Image: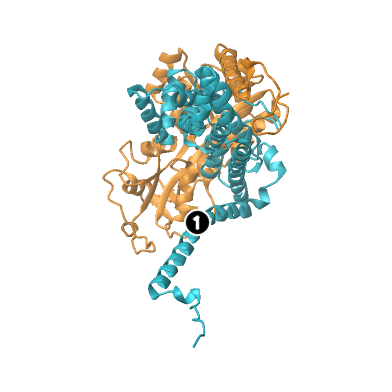
Chain colours: A cyan, B orange
Amino acid sequence: MNDPVVPAPALSLFRATSFTRKKIRVQKAAGILFGAMACALLVPLLALVVYLVVNAWPALTWEFLTDVPQGGMRRGGIWPALIGTLYLVVFSRLFSTPVGVLAGVYLNEYAKDNWLTRVVNLAVVNLAGVPSIVHALFGVGAFVIFAGLGKSVLAASLTLAIMTLPVMIVATREALAAVPMAFRVACWNLGASRWQTIRTIVLPNSIGGILTGVILEVCRAAGETAPIMFTGAIFFKAVERWDFFPYSPREQCMALSYHLHAISTQVPGVPEPMLYATAVVLLGFVLAFNSLAIVVRFRMRQRKKW
Amino acid sequence: MRTMPNGSNRTARWVAPGRVRTRAAPLVLLVLATALTVGLAAAGCGGKPRAQAAKKFVIANGGSDTMVNLAQMWSEEYHKVNPNVSIEVAGGGSGVGIRDLIQGIVAIANCSRDMTEAEKAQARKNTGKDPVEWVVGYDGIAIYAHKDSPVEQLTIEELAGIYGEGGKIANWSQLGVNLKAADGSDKIVRVSRQNSSGTYAYFRENVLDKKDFKLGSKDMSGSKDVVELVSRTKCAIGYSGMGYATEGVKMIKLAAKNGDEGCVPSVENVAVGKYPLSRSLLLYTLGRPEGDVKAYLEWALSPAGQKIVKEAGYIPISAVPKNIEI
């Protein structure tokens, strides 16, 4: 009897007991469930886009984008509203980007952890939580009446700027905080001042994050209706096709979001596809800028050296 | 020439210490450019009156939601007649238009009701000018019901009973109408307007005899909203401009007194004053207008402008004989 003892196959050593089988089953089920939830996120977005585009298809033409409203806003296009939205976005970015970035730099790079910093941080967080309609009323009081701007592109842009400021500040702060401390320390050790360090090391390395913040807030500024409704959006203004400067900053302007509200609640007999097409253009505007943000972030990440 | 720390012998370009890495420069430039632009924009148009700031003459026009579509169509057509004048149109309600006129925000206020004495006094006090009224057309306030509603006719008194504070009519059965919602209730769903609306003010004055509305009505913020909600609600009743009729609703005949024969608002019925709820569509200016505003008003009252009043679903002034007071 010198047959070697046949070692039991490894598998049988660890034969799954009913307990482990159950654990594996639960794990699989959980994986499927969570995965399904993640996929379910896509469903509303896809459904929304498909629904809107299908309904809007007959009206979605180049003419629709570049023509002025005609026939009592029941025909023609949305040119003045499109340009008006661009106006509001550009002006509001001009106001809130510098303030937001500078405040973010201060809070992340200069501020000591004292009561003032804590108050500012608290203010930022609270400002972010204020509903847009409240911003609208604040805009009426502060810019339209108190500052004497009247209902105008300026007043509406300033209101949008205030509304988007907290996210600008937070985005800047996060982008700056993502730059490793070692970079700053190395720079300081070479004798650079705080500002030289920020200018040459910190900002260049965080510009991607900051730009992402700017672009995301473009979407918000373009999409909001409430803040501009009382501060500078109008029902209609007669402008020419391809006129890129139909509004002066002290005048009111049309805007896509308000135009959609107006033609769906005020104008009888607007063809359905036109309503949907206006919504699609607004959504397209936002999605295009969101995609731009993704591209910028991707490009900047590739340039990252840590 | 120097070897990089990671061992590659890529040439490192030597730059002056002061300008080591200038990738932040665009950002700094952006900030500066912003400050400059904003400053210029503010300086450029701060001092001048708004009409001169633009290359074109701009007439701001706002107010009544009933008239907003008419004003829009005028603006669109007038731009073809006179491309140098651009007319801004805003809504919000007659009250908003009057307030903006008093504050000098708009040159022309659209109103579907008369200015009150208090408002006129305030305009005089604020601007030193008398508001001038221009009748540009007529409108009948239609009483709308769902298109399948069996309701045919109502009187002003019944309407007051439905809408007015202390009014006893809450169910359709009280009017002898067999109309039930899907859940079996025959409660009258009252659709009304927000209180800055001229239509609201007109209805309150002419139907409710200046008494208040009963609480619990659905107050919509636009003329079209009223019609839309009524067209979706079987048991609803609502009031709105006659120009807002759609296929989903029908107009209820209205009689001034019990026993009278009712009629729906049509051009003829409003023009001869037979329909009880008719009103003037008004434009208000501060003082006698001059120049471009005057030209615009004259155009609005001309046959070309009045044709658009008719297209918008209202009654042009020419349709009403001069001897009839509306």
Foreground pick, A85 / B315: A85
**Image coordinates for residue A191, horizontal then vertical, percent:** 53, 17
Q: Is residue B173 in view from this perspective?
A: yes
**Image coordinates for residue B287, horizontal then vertical, percent:** 51, 16
**Image coordinates for residue A67, horizontal then vertical, percent:** 69, 38
**Vertical relation: A100 (above or below) B274:** above
User: Disc 1 is attached to a residue of which chain?
Assistant: A
Residue A47 relative to residue B168: left or right: right
How many numbered discs?
Answer: 1
Where on the picture, by quarter, is residue B114?
A: top left
**Vertical relation: A134 (above or below) B249:** above
Q: Is residue A91 in view from this perspective?
A: no
Q: Which residue is disc 1 drawn over?
A: A38
Residue B50 relative to residue B121: left or right: right
View extreme (front): residue: A2
**Image coordinates for residue A13, horizontal then vertical, percent:** 45, 75
Where on the picture, by quarter, is residue A281?
A: top right
Q: Residue at position x 52%, y 32% from top?
A: A179
Give the amino acid type for the residue marked by disc 1 in the picture.
Ala
Where on the picture, by quarter, is residue B8?
A: top right
Foreground pick, A197 / B52: A197
**Vertical relation: B42 (above or below) A277:** above
Mark 1 Cα within 10 Å, few/some/many (few <14, many 20+)?
Answer: few
Residue B175 relative to residue B97: left or right: left
Secondary structure beneath label 1 = helix
User: Which corner quadrant holds the N terminus of chain B?
Assistant: top right
Residue B84 relative to residue A124: left or right: right
